Image: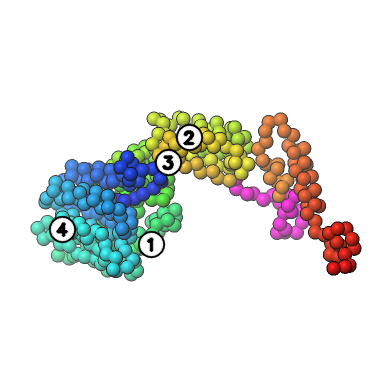
Amino acid sequence: MRIVHLSDLHLGFRQYQRVSPNGINQREVDVGASFKRAIDRVIALRPDFVLLAGDIFHVVRPSNPAILHAFMQFARLVQELPNAKIVMVAGNHDTPRTAETGCILRLFAPLGIHVVVGEPERITFPDEGVSILAVPDLPGAVPALTPDPDARYNVLLLHGEVEGMLPEYAARMERPTTEITTEELAPARWDYVALGHYHVYREIAPNAFYSGSVDYTSANPWGEIREERAAGVHRGPEGGKGLIEWDLESATHVFHPLPISRPLIDLNRLDATGMSVEGVDAAMAQRVEHVPGGIEEKIVRLVVENVTRHVARQLDQRAIREYKRRALHFHLDLRRPEVARRSVSGAPGRRPSLSEVLREKLETRPLTSGVNRAAFVELGLDYLDRATKAAAPIPIGMSMLGGDGDGA
């Protein structure tokens, strides 16, 4: 008896400004296509149960095209797998914060999908001997998670964050959701625990998993890629997304990779320490032009570390605009050098003077070849001294015209 577990579809997700020929945000189209391929894979696997662990949509009120696409794909799933039991819980992105708003997921109940929103629900299937405790996003206290003692197999379907599991970058960016401790989860009491909310495939216990999302739909896809590489599921331009197949009888699972709609390319980082403007431009171009198949219509990031403000201002903006034109999205992430203050004479904790700060900056700034650094530094300090004297306040009692100022 097999379960397919997928989550975090985030249909209706929008990002960047590019639109499709039909006038729909291109990333919304991409995510919809990734979802369709996920449904194709589920149909091909022909499981007994399909569990959707929340965040079906990206927002509480998705666009009409996103709603229509979701309805058509779920209807296709039900039609192709008439004997499969499909259970869906609401995630934090699906759950409105006001009662009168209502949850859009109820739209799928007439298709024969078991939709659980608002509060936990235990769904039993006596013929299969399976009991599913479905727990949607529930801000506040975690409900009691207890298996059904009369069921042969007990499955927990839950959208939430296992305490301490979410990496810092994701915890900062994600909307608040149900947080549960491993003690409350108690995976050993269940035959399978299907989790949603975290976008990366992750094992919590031998029988408890996050399936991850079906495409890159968070504010920091680069963090997701880093996590996927650590989990050993990232496959380069094909991404690291997928779904889980779990066999209740053998208690084994298979992670099925799903191709994403658009490659995300994180170029090798560039350390600009001591480099001239021309050197940084050339190194950036070298990285961009050596992407297999080019950067056209891809999502690309290039991190340049230790780039000074002076160099950043003079980079070849025409070339950067061309990179942005060619890619669906080109993100140039310029990072300033970390400030390492030099020790100075005087009392402990004394703040360096303006001249000391200027000297440090001028002694470390990249220079055009042939410029004498010592003369350059002294000239800068001389300019500062002149400016300081010119800006000196006029003594009280002195007239701006040069008199002694004792009159009105």
Q: Identify whether 307 is placed above or below 96.
A: above
Q: Give the mark, 1 or 2, whose residue is nearer the N terminus.
A: 1
Q: Is residue 248 visible?
A: no
**Residue beneath disc 1:** 176
Nearer mark to the viewer, of 3 and 2: 2
Nearer mark to the viewer, of 1 and 4: 4
Q: Identify whether 214 is placed above or below 99.
A: above
Marks 1 and 3 in Cβ contact (< 8 Å): no
Residues shaded magenta: 337-356
Which residue is painted at 28% across and 46% down in the image? 32
Q: Give the mark, 1 or 4, whose residue is nearer the N terminus.
A: 4
Instruction: Judge by depth and name the residue closer to the eye, 81 or 73.
Output: 73
Label disc, if present, on residue 110 of the rendered structure: 4
Q: Secondary structure at mark 1?
A: loop
**Residue beneath disc 2:** 322
Marks 1 and 2, how far apart in space?
39 Å
